[in-house]
Structures are given as structure tokens and as C-alpha cells.
């Protein structure tokens, strides 16, 4: 009996133990399921956030169940209407579960989905959809570093060789160190500070951006200009990488007086220094410059990129800026006044506020842009549009460059100006009452500037033609597809005519499929045309360049282009 009792007790103990394991195991599995869901096979929890009026950041969770495959990147699709998606990024070439979409239109709703890309070139089904609308008031969310507020990342501005700066980049310290080693020699890192903000891109994303913004190696680049006092602007640049055996003996400095009109302020600096200061400028006036190298043979290089700055009455000194090169120290200059040694408060973004009057007399009051977009506006605006009452402000931007240019195109007078006496605009127009720097844009009317006499009309015609050529905004897509083993590129134009268009594969001009010729052609609004790439191009991932005349309007690597499908090319018409 005792033995039976002991056996019964042991059996009960084992039963209780097994019951405990079963209950605990179920609870553990349920808890894991609640946190991660089932073994997800697609990216999940896709979220879209507008961080500026023209930029959206996408973030998501990677799939959990990969069936032994390795994720090498993500494919991003954008909805083009009616539940139909178009691939805008074939492969981010990064396992980082976030991506930034730039150059977007303010006020337009964008919808995206994401798929994981595996090393065997297969991809998962897409994630959930995520939509967001960039607004004039969209800004980067407040500091939201996950899990640890002590994590330190690096915030910086990144300027590739063509001078197009990517501002407010946040990457990890590891990516920052690798970026300094792997970037091109003419790409500039500036204004680097440590931050607790979450990364908004990664190393691969920056290198891809850099690859799409290269320029010719035989010009000074990038040119960077900085207002260092109310009457002084400093210029700095890097010398050409290729001089074809010639020796540089100085640089030619030019000021852009008007669209297409340049005034030489220094024929030859007679100095190989890549810095130059312009003094005695007018406070509140925007100045645009370009630089060319001068050789011993009395020849000069093609000019650098254009760069602009506005000396203002109060130049804010950047806080705790670091510079990678001596060149970029001009980006962190200090006014001619003593700098307080006391720790400065957290830096605030300084923007530019102004009134913008169009040629039909309509005025936008209290427009606020970032300094970089304001400088670009000065360069490409219609010469009949007037910028007045320029001041610095810490208020949030309420528009972007694309929105201003679109508004300008709607309110541009197409008729010739009538012959009448010129109107004096030395005094600003009377404006409606304003409630402060954050006032909503109001509308008013002032008389447009007109020319006087036949000379005035001719001048207006010439400048308008030049300005329109400079200010063109192209809206087109290029995609790749393969037909009979031959690589092709299709261009779809959805904007004004692209005049004298050619497409280069590296440095070789591609042949148009419908004419079997490589001659320049006009790409009209609504038309589609196809070129074929030289044999063997698929093995070298060539640089595809779209030109309008001699002007480069798009550069991208063939491997980075979206996939298209073969269609009936007889539809190459409006």
C-alpha cells in the first residue's frame, strides 16, 4: 500500500508539473504572439510621416519569417490611382527599415507600400498602405529616439559635387564614420552636431543620393557661398579634379546680375586659393555667384554650380558647428563681433520671410521659406516677380519652392506689357494688417512692373525668354525594360516640352527606337519615347543622363531605375 501511495504521489507531482509547463508555455506563446504577431512574412506597420512641405519619411517593421533568405533591401511602390501602384524604388539597397521621399508637392496626398527584397531577387508581398499629405506647416517630429534617450547620433548637412545640399541628415555614429571614408572626395559634410534624434536615413541612402548628384570633374565644385556679415559674402570651392595637364593660376569670379547675364568681378585672382570674399554689399539683397578656373594657357574652365546668399542685418551665428574640410569652415563663419563664451541655448532654425508679387499684380504676403529654397527662388523666379520686405524669422516655413513656382506660373501675365511710364517701387506696397510672423498668407494687389518704350519691350522679351528657359520645371519619369535581351529606357513626359532631348548611357548617346537615330528631339507633354542602350550595358550599371540641349535635367544609375513593361511604341504621340 505504501508503495502504491508513493507511486500515486509521484504521478500527481508529474501531472501538476506537466500542467504547469503547458499553461506557462501557452501563456508565453500568447505573449509572444501578442507582441510580434504570427511569423510575419511581409513588412508590417508601415507608417508615413511628413517632415517638411516636400519630404515624407517611411518607416516599417521587417518581416519575421524569411524562410532562410537574406533581406538585401526594400522595394517601395507609390499609388498612382484606383488602387494601382507604380514602383518608385526597385531596391533601397539597405536593410534599414526607413526611407525618405523628397521633392514632393505640398498639399498632395501620397500613398505607399513596401516589400522586402531578398538576395535571390525575389520579394515579399507588399505591406499595408500608408498615406500622408505634406503641408506647408509640416516639420520633423520632436525628438523621438526609441528605447534610449541617451543614444547619440550625428546630424549634418551633406553637399555632393553638384552643390545640391541635403539638410538635416541624421545617421548613426557608425554610418557617420563610414561616410567620411566612402564618400566622394568632392562631397562636403558640414554643420555636424551630435543629436538624440532618430536616424532619418543611412549610409547607403546617402551614397545613393551622392551618386545621383555628381558633376563634371573639370570644373570647380561644389561652390558654397555664405553671408558672414550684413555687407560681406565669402565664397569657397574645391578645384577641378581634371585639368588636362594644364596648371591652374587663379580663378574667375562672376556675379549673376540677371537671368543669363553675368558680370565679371575678378578676371583672375592670380591665386590658387579656393576662397574669396566680396565686400561692400547691400544688406537684404541676394547675390548669386559662379567660379571658373584660369589656366596658364589663358583658357578657363566651364563654370561651377551657381550659389546664392543674402547678407542680412542680423546674421545668426550657428551653434556648435563642425566641419570636415577647411573648405567648409566658410559655412560656419562668425560675424565681426565677440562670441559669447557662455553655453548657447538649443539652436533654432532661421528662415526667410518676404512678400512675393507676381507679374499680374497678385501679392503673397508673409511667405516663409528655408534659406536654401529662398536662394534658389532668387535664381529661377520670373524676372517680373518682385521680392520685397525680406527679413529673418524663426517662424515655421509656410510654403516651399515648388509651391511658390507653381503659384507664379498661374499668376504670370502672358501678354506684352503696355507702353506707359514706369511705376516707382522704392516704397513697399500697402499691406493688410498682419497678426505676427505666423500670419496666414494674405492676398493683395499692387501694380505690376512694366517696361517703358520700345527698348523696354525688347529688354522684357529677352529677359523673359531667358528666365523661362532657366526656370523650367520638368515632370517626367524614366523607366527600364528588356526586350529580346536588349536593355531599353522609356521617358514619359507629363509637363512642358523637353527641347532638344538626348539620353546618354555613360558618355554614349542612345538611339531612339522609332527613328533609329541619336539626334536630339522635342519630348512634348503627354508623349512617351524609348531609346535602346548599347550592347553590354546591363553588365556595368551605366549612368543614364537626360539632357535638354546641353543642360543636364536628370541623372540616375540604370540599376536604380523603376521597372517598366514593353508597350506598343507607336503610341509615341500626344
Image (cartoon, helix red, strand yellow):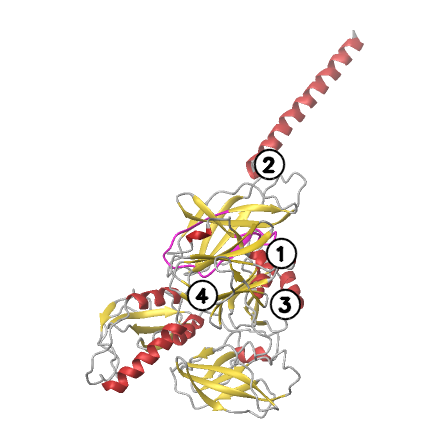
> Which numbered tag is attached to residue 521?
4
- Furthest residue toward front: 516
| Image quadrant in which you'd find residue 194 | bottom right
Question: Is 128 displayed left or right of 421 in the figure?
Answer: right
Are the two marked residues, 2 and 3, in contact with CB atoms closer than 8 angstroms?
Answer: no
Q: Which mark is first along the chain, 3 or 2?
A: 2
What separation in Å lies between label 2 and label 4 (alpha carbons)?
53 Å
Magenta-span inclusion, residue 400: no
Query: Which structural element holds mark 2?
Result: loop
Q: Which residues are magenta?
A: 89-113
Q: Which mark is first along the chain, 4 or 2?
A: 2
Q: Position of residue 120 (x, y in %)?
A: 65, 45
Q: Which mark is first along the chain, 1 or 3?
A: 3
What quarter of the picture does the C terminus occupy? Answer: bottom left
Magenta-span inclusion, residue 98: yes
- Furthest residue toward left: 420
Q: Which mark is first along the chain, 2 or 1?
A: 2
Q: Position of residue 236 (x, y in %)?
A: 55, 81
Of labels 3 and 1, the one closer to you? 1
What quarter of the picture does the N terminus occupy? Answer: top right
Q: Which residue is mark 1?
A: 538
Reply above or below: 243 against 31.
below
What separation in Å lies between label 4 and label 1 (alpha carbons)?
25 Å
Query: Which structural element holds mark 4?
Result: strand
Of labels 2 and 4, the one closer to you? 4
Does residue 457 show up?
A: yes
| Residue at 61 percent of width and 28 percent of height | 26
Name the residue nearer the viewer: 253 or 352.
Answer: 253
Amino acid at each position: 500500500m505504501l508503495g502504491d501511495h508513493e507511486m500515486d504521489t509521484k504521478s500527481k507531482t508529474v501531472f501538476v508539473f506537466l500542467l504547469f509547463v503547458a499553461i506557462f508555455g501557452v501563456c508565453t506563446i500568447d505573449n509572444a504572439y501578442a507582441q510580434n504577431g504570427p511569423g510575419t512574412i511581409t513588412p508590417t506597420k508601415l507608417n508615413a510621416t511628413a517632415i517638411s512641405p516636400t519630404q515624407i519619411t517611411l518607416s516599417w517593421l521587417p518581416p519575421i519569417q524569411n524562410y532562410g533568405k537574406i533581406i538585401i533591401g526594400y522595394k517601395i511602390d507609390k499609388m498612382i490611382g484606383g488602387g494601382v501602384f507604380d514602383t518608385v524604388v526597385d531596391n533601397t539597397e539597405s536593410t534599414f527599415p526607413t526611407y525618405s521621399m523628397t521633392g514632393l508637392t505640398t498639399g498632395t496626398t501620397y500613398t505607399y507600400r513596401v516589400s522586402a527584397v531578398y538576395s535571390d531577387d525575389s520579394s515579399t508581398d507588399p505591406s499595408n498602405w500608408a498615406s500622408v499629405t505634406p503641408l506647408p506647416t509640416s516639420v520633423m517630429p520632436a525628438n523621438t529616439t526609441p528605447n534610449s534617450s541617451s543614444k547619440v547620433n550625428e546630424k549634418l548637412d551633406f553637399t555632393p559635387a553638384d552643390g545640391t545640399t541635403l539638410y538635416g541628415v541624421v545617421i548613426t555614429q557608425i554610418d557617420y564614420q563610414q561616410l567620411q571614408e566612402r564618400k566622394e572626395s568632392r562631397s562636403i559634410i558640414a554643420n555636424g552636431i551630435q543629436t538624440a534624434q532618430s536616424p532619418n536615413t543611412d549610409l547607403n541612402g546617402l551614397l545613393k543620393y551622392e551618386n545621383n548628384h555628381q558633376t563634371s570633374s573639370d570644373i570647380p565644385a561644389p561652390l558654397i557661398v555664405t553671408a558672414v556679415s550684413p555687407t560681406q559674402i565669402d565664397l569657397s570651392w574645391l578645384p577641378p579634379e581634371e585639368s588636362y595637364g594644364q596648371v591652374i593660376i587663379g580663378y574667375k569670379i562672376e556675379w549673376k546680375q540677371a537671368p543669363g547675364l553675368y558680370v565679371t568681378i575678378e578676371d583672375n585672382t592670380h591665386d590658387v586659393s579656393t576662397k574669396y570674399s566680396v565686400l561692400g554689399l547691400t544688406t537684404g539683397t541676394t547675390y548669386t555667384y559662379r567660379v571658373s578656373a584660369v589656366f596658364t594657357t589663358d583658357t578657363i574652365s566651364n563654370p561651377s554650380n551657381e550659389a546664392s546668399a543674402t547678407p542680412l542685418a542680423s546674421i545668426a551665428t550657428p551653434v556648435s558647428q563642425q566641419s570636415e574640410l577647411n573648405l567648409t569652415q566658410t559655412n560656419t563663419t562668425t560675424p565681426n563681433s565677440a562670441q559669447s563664451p557662455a553655453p548657447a541655448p538649443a539652436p533654432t532654425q532661421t528662415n526667410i520671410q518676404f512678400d512675393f508679387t507676381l507679374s499680374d499684380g497678385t501679392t503673397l504676403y508673409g511667405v516663409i521659406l528655408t534659406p536654401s529654397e529662398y536662394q534658389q527662388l532668387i535664381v529661377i523666379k520670373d524676372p517680373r516677380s518682385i521680392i520685397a520686405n525680406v527679413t529673418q524669422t524663426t517662424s515655421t516655413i509656410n510654403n516651399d519652392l515648388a509651391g511658390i513656382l507653381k503659384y507664379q506660373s498661374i499668376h504670370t501675365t502672358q501678354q506684352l506689357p503696355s507702353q506707359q511710364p514706369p511705376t516707382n517701387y522704392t516704397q513697399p506696397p500697402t499691406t493688410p494688417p498682419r497678426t505676427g510672423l505666423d500670419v496666414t498668407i494674405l492676398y493683395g494687389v499692387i501694380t505690376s512692373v512694366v517696361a517703358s518704350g520700345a527698348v523696354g519691350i525688347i529688354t522684357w522679351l529677352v529677359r523673359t525668354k531667358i528666365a523661362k528657359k532657366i526656370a523650367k520645371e520638368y515632370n517626367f519619369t524614366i523607366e527600364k525594360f528588356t526586350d529580346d535581351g536588349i536593355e531599353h529606357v522609356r521617358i514619359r513626359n507629363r509637363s512642358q516640352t523637353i527641347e532638344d532631348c538626348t539620353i546618354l548611357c555613360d558618355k554614349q548617346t542612345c538611339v531612339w527606337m522609332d527613328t533609329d537615330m541619336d539626334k536630339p528631339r522635342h519630348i512634348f507633354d503627354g508623349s512617351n519615347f524609348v531609346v535602346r542602350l548599347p550592347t553590354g550595358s546591363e553588365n556595368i550599371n551605366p549612368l543614364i543622363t537626360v539632357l535638354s540641349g546641353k543642360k543636364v535635367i536628370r541623372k540616375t544609375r540604370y540599376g536604380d531605375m523603376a521597372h517598366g513593361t514593353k508597350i506598343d511604341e507607336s503610341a509615341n504621340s500626344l
